[in-house]
Image (cartoon, coloured by chain):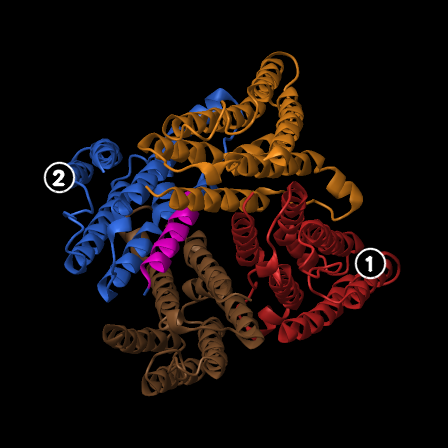
Chain colours: A orange, B red, C brown, D blue
Amino acid sequence: MNKERLAAFTDAVLAIIMTILVLELEKPAQVTLAGLWALRANFFAYTLSFFWLGLMWTTHHSNWHLVKKVTNHTVMYSLLMLFIASLFPYTTSLVATNFYNPTAQVFYGIVVLGVSFSNMAISHSLKAVNPTVHFGWLYGLPNRSVLLDIVVKLIGLLLALTVYPPAMVYAILVATFIVGFASWQNKSKA
Amino acid sequence: MNKERLAAFTDAVLAIIMTILVLELEKPAQVTLAGLWALRANFFAYTLSFFWLGLMWTTHHSNWHLVKKVTNHTVMYSLLMLFIASLFPYTTSLVATNFYNPTAQVFYGIVVLGVSFSNMAISHSLKAVNPTVHFGWLYGLPNRSVLLDIVVKLIGLLLALTVYPPAMVYAILVATFIVGFASWQNKSKA
Amino acid sequence: MNKERLAAFTDAVLAIIMTILVLELEKPAQVTLAGLWALRANFFAYTLSFFWLGLMWTTHHSNWHLVKKVTNHTVMYSLLMLFIASLFPYTTSLVATNFYNPTAQVFYGIVVLGVSFSNMAISHSLKAVNPTVHFGWLYGLPNRSVLLDIVVKLIGLLLALTVYPPAMVYAILVATFIVGFASWQNKSKA
Amino acid sequence: MNKERLAAFTDAVLAIIMTILVLELEKPAQVTLAGLWALRANFFAYTLSFFWLGLMWTTHHSNWHLVKKVTNHTVMYSLLMLFIASLFPYTTSLVATNFYNPTAQVFYGIVVLGVSFSNMAISHSLKAVNPTVHFGWLYGLPNRSVLLDIVVKLIGLLLALTVYPPAMVYAILVATFIVGFASWQNKSKA
């Protein structure tokens, strides 16, 4: 497998996922400000999913130009990552219409965590055959940002399961800023 | 971030948005000329959205081949632009079925203006690191066309909010011809 | 506008149109052979649209590798062609569920003819600036095949308007074989 | 036809098919673990279709970098393959909601077999003009894995038609592991 072909396929699938999210966005019962406000959970979930995927896409390929080789494992983990990510329109819609439902929130969170762990597996597989790339746990991000990201999401998951279901999406929102900040600094150095 | 990868991703998302617009296009209650005529607001909104996005795409990359570098800011503004643009199928559908509704028209107009301003931010970020490209406010377009485009849209927005909701889409139609003409002349020179 | 970027965008939009056709394909009321047979007009329209677009895509780029330059006109006609083609999922669905309805059939036919004429305009714009490419009316196809294709479709249109609505899709089926055969021979020579 | 353009088009269509599968995935009646469990046939069919297509995509291009030439036949068989593959969202949805229905299962199986046979035809057309590539019946896979894959699917088809409809999807699941294993070993050698 050629690295360019894999990257192009990954980008295509992510672009499609991000763009078809809108097909699940609910229409207002009445087209007024109040009608749109009633859908605020929809717009919030939509926005969060779009930018989470967008940030993931930019992080996914930091230092990618330094990658010389991809392995069977890279391809397998990439398919796994894309499969989990392909559930975003589904879980986004679930969470949008069931904002206080723990099952919806936890399903959403598991998809997000699943994509994160798949990306760490991709990163690991690249590191093995590209010794000069200096990948950490998640591409070029500092390990402590990645750890913080996972911890925040796991706390959100725990709170969603026990006391407050929306804690899941708010934790992902916070984690997005953490990774976004680390990603920004990382690329500024590059 | 490689400039080619960013451009390919942008193009992919725009291509998908333009193509899934049709999935929101209403079917006629009766398949007759009268039945299709009853959907004229749908066809008008669909056509306007398709060509506005198409024109934006052609403008987006005028002089792009001269760009040598993209920055973190370019990537961030591009994601913002794509996010706002991704709402097109949603607002097009809203405006099509609520043509005389000010909320629908203003929402549609804000999305269009949001994409325009994001593009100006992208253009600004490119200018900073590519001093030889001669970008103005909006890529290679003359500043006075860009100003006229924004003014026309703002007048449409004002009229939509006060006396006549469809003024919004008609203003965008007029603005499309202004930018289309400027873009045509600009590329003829290049 | 770079010729590669235009071709990639065109290919992306056509790929999306061909693939989302299936989202409009009706599900059988009963999942039995009889239930599927009751949808035969749906499957026929779906198949015709898919291969017509597929053939158009292969024809679209015959001799494209010889093209050195595209003009403003090429871009404008390409956007027009993609706009008309983007209506395929809509008209295919209309014709599938209203197979004996003249309005549905004529709308379908006009979209097909509109794409054909836009492609002839694209071809013409390329010929003007690439004198060495030997384009005819429609890329590398012999003019008499193109003429026959248009005549067959116009006869179908006439019959659909007067005596037998499905004449339209059958004419397009026949025309597809004519162009397909010419395209095949043309590429075998190349 | 340029081999890169054909591969890019094929990849785009496959990426879109895999990603729009989710649009047909049923939402739970109640958002609880029990509600999701009630949709287990949906999730199973979705997962099977996604990875079957993903594996097909990775297999499709093994040794593709060695291909120098594609013929008219390659293009024709590729369009046929994409057409059959484009039915995946439709048959996946049918099988998901009619898991014990022989018509749904056989239709799903015929689509899978149709894609396999089209790929063998593509592989054959490439072999004819690229004598140095060492393609077997299905790209670089060993012929005995391909034979086993077809035999398992045909047994599944037979059982689905006679005693147990879901035998079809289970046979495809088993066949996926057979081809996946062969594909993995094949690429490890390469």
Q: Residues within 10 Å of mark 2 (few under 14, many from 20)?
A: some
Residues shaded magenta: D2-18
Question: What residue do we see at 60% from left, 73% from top?
Answer: B34
From the viewer's perspective, is C7 left or right of C80?
left
Quarter occupied by the C terminus of chain C: bottom left
Callout 1 amino acid: Leu
Image height of D47 relative to C113, above or below: above
In the rendered image, residue A84, in percent from the top left (x then y), is placed at 45, 32
**Same subunit: marks 2 and 1:** no
Eyeballing the image, is D123 above or below D21?
Answer: below
Residue C39 badge: none
Horizontally, residue C159 falls left or right of residue D162, namely: right
D48, B18: nearer the viewer:
B18
Foreground pick, B43 / B29: B43
* Residues packed near mark 1 inside 10 Å, few (<14), some (14 to 19) or many (20 plus): many
Q: Which residue is mark 1?
A: B157
**Which element is circle 1 on?**
helix
**Observer-nearest residue: B143 or B56?**
B143
Which amino acid, by three-letter code, is at mark 2?
Val
| Residue D98 is at least partly visible in this image | no
Distance (Cα) linking label 2 and label 1: 65 Å
Quadrant occupied by the N terminus of chain C: bottom right
- Which residue does the image show at 57% across and 16% down from the upper left? A154
Whether B174 is drawn above or below D126: the answer is below
Q: Indicate the chain on which mark 1 is placed.
A: B
Report the residue marked by disc 2: D151
Specify the farthest residue to the top. A162
Which subunit holds the residue at mark 2?
D
